[in-house]
Amino acid sequence: METETNLKEYLLLLAKRLVANHDHCVRKSIIELFNELITVVPKSSFFESEQENCIVPNLIDICFIGLTDQYEIVKASARNLFEALCRANSNQVDDILHDRLRHITDKLPIVVRQGNGDAIVSQLTVLLPCLSTEIRLLLDSRAPEIVDLFRILAQSLQFEKKKMAITKLDGGKLEELKISEFLTNLPLKFDLNHGILKKFCQEMGKLGFSEVLDLIYTEMQATSSQNFQSAYLYLMILIADSQNGENQRCESGLLMLELLLEKISTIEVNLHVKDDEIRDTSLCHDDASILLALSLIGTALLAEKCRNHLERSIKLRVETLFYILKHCVSKNWIVASAAQRALRELAKEMNIDQNLNSVTLLLDSHSPYIISKIVLACRRKTDHIDAPLVFRAFMERSSHEFMPEETRHQCIQIVDSLLQSLDSFEQKHTLLISQCLSTYINAVNRSTGYKGIQQEVQPSTSKERTEEIKDEEREENLEGDDVLMMEAEKPPVPLVVQNIEGILKRTKHLLFSPYRPIQINVLAVLNEGLLCVQNFDDILLPMVHQNWLSIGAHFTGSKDLLLQAAIVETIRIMSAVSKTFIYRRVLFEWWPSIEERLRKIADAPSRHLSDAYKFQIEVFKSLPVILVNIGVDDSKELAKFEPILEIFSEKSRNPQIRDLANEFRQRLYKLKENFSVD
């Protein structure tokens, strides 16, 4: 007995020293040694649970260490050792594995907080396949062991919100990431490795995806903590992403999908910046924004797993698209990126040709349903704020063949409702609505190639109708024998143009808003609107005249250089569409105030991010275009611009501004010499 005890101690000491050796061949050899020991003396007291010298628990620990090794030959040896142990005494091995599962579950939170979470999660990953049959039974029966495991794991997963500010990627790069890679933008506390958790979830998904989904669904309903719900969703997304193809049992997936849609519709986050705020909210993360981002990604993945059912349920499909579109324009970058990634995932999985713009085709195919849902949202007091968000996201991503006939009138209804809401809700959402209106008019301009909506051509009068007119006039004894030609009536103004004219009339007074974001967005609405109605002089010229008064009040009284830069862009567009109509206003009203402002900031440093730099760049880029558009060909008028150009071309501290001033100066000399446009 003493000999066996000494031998046991020697073997365990040998294993302890060599199983962690830096040479993988040594690690492989010690594992194979124990494998041969089982083969040679399978009935030894070393392998009987009743004996004091039993080393089976120690050998199982050795197996776990070997199964997590980076070398495949070591893993294969450990796998052979574990199979040999199971053949020798399967009941004992099962009991030990269950004990290990309970032990790992109990110490998981402490180990994770100590910074060693990767190691213990790796042990769980190795343990799951060893208990594959038992785990399935535990999942089916909702055994306390497996429920406790998920609860404790969810408690241990916490997101590092401060690190999200430095993990942000460009929107295009985020959309190209795989779902599992996208989650790496949600860094975890205690240095938990995303890849280790992914491997654990892959193993768990192999054991029963539907059962795990049912368990997570139940736990999410049972807890009100957004932290825990986010952790459960994080695990669910990793598990679902590891599954290939469609889930045959989609009942649990549909239940979870409906739960996520409910959460998306009820989670309150700052979707847009309020009118009186000038701040960047894109990096302001809280528990709600993380839960919302994970819910959006989870919705897209579950839609993939249940896509056959979604193709039969238009209501559920449209509701999914509606809520995802709502958050595509969120000011919170992680929420907006998640929504855009989810939208792309939905487009990919709905059998759409990937050679084309799949998101655009997806939205075009559902446009009547989405537009109808937006119309309904406009009429409700509870979710009226959803309408401009979804409408803006839809217009940004829909095709350039703007508004099919069946949805055109509904789009105009939406715009009319948005204009009415400017006078409602205490004007809390003016900025949001102005952004939506700008996007709407931009969609119209995209459909026409920025050439403006064309006037409808009236059919010419037929020869027979002309003869009838002659006979009627002879019968009425009109003066003279010649037929008096009837004055052609003006063609009717298209409904869309009337709609845009209403937008311009309703928003022009908002230029006097005390808030810079509203002023700049209203200028964007004006820019897009003028381009849209450029072929209708009866609408265009009055709009230029009426808005010039508002603009003039700003470029003579406002000291906001960023607003001044936006005004310069607007005047450039006015000059392009109205030509000589604003000739005198540009030369005698606008330019003197701009020249005075330029002289004041000529010697000031102009950094690339400063308002002064943006203003100067916009002036020297736009001014040559404006002069050509309004047809300035008088050398005396052109000479007005030489002094300021001389100052900036010689004294400006910014090389880019200096180069633009020199370029404009040379062009001005050519204009003076030729009195013609280049």
Image: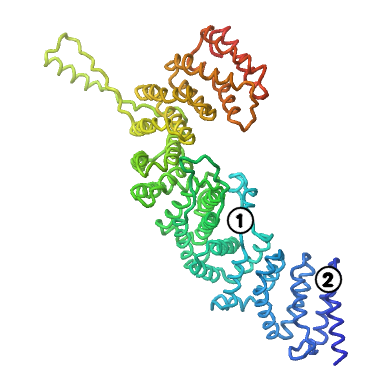
Near mark 1 (Cα within 10 A), the count class, few <14, some 14-19 or many ≥20, is some
**Left or right: 422, with 634 as reference point:** left
Q: Looking at the image, which residue is at 59% across and 18% down?
A: 599
**Left or right: 301, with 509 as reference point:** right
Q: Which percent across, then down, holds residue 180?
A: 61, 57
Which amino acid, by three-letter code, is at mark 2?
A: Arg
For this rendering, which residue is in front, 406 or 417? 417
Q: Quadrant of residue 156?
A: bottom right
Q: Residue furthest bottom?
A: 1
Seen in the picture, residue 382 relative to 619 is either above or below; the reply is below
Seen in the picture, residue 641 relative to 125 is either above or below; the reply is above
Q: Which percent across, then down, holds residue 134?
A: 61, 79
**Left or right: 7, with 389 as reference point:** right
Q: Secondary structure at mark 1?
A: helix
Seen in the picture, residue 384 relative to 266 is either above or below; the reply is above
Residue at mark 1 to residue at mark 2: CA–CA distance: 35 Å
Q: Where is mark 2, residue-wise?
A: 27
Which amino acid, by three-letter code, is at mark 1?
A: Leu
Is residue 300 in view from this perspective? no
Colour mapping: rainbow
Q: Which percent across, then down, holds residue 618?
A: 56, 25
Q: Looking at the image, which residue is at 76% across and 89% down?
A: 48
Circle 1 or circle 2, nearest the eye: 1
Q: Secondary structure at mark 2?
A: helix
Near mark 2 (Cα within 10 A), the count class, few <14, some 14-19 or many ≥20, is many
In the rendering, which numbered label is found on residue 443? none
Q: Where is mark 1, residue-wise?
A: 183
Seen in the picture, residue 272 relative to 300 is either above or below; the reply is above
Q: Quadrant of the C terminus?
A: top right
Q: Which percent across, then down, holds residue 24?
A: 84, 67
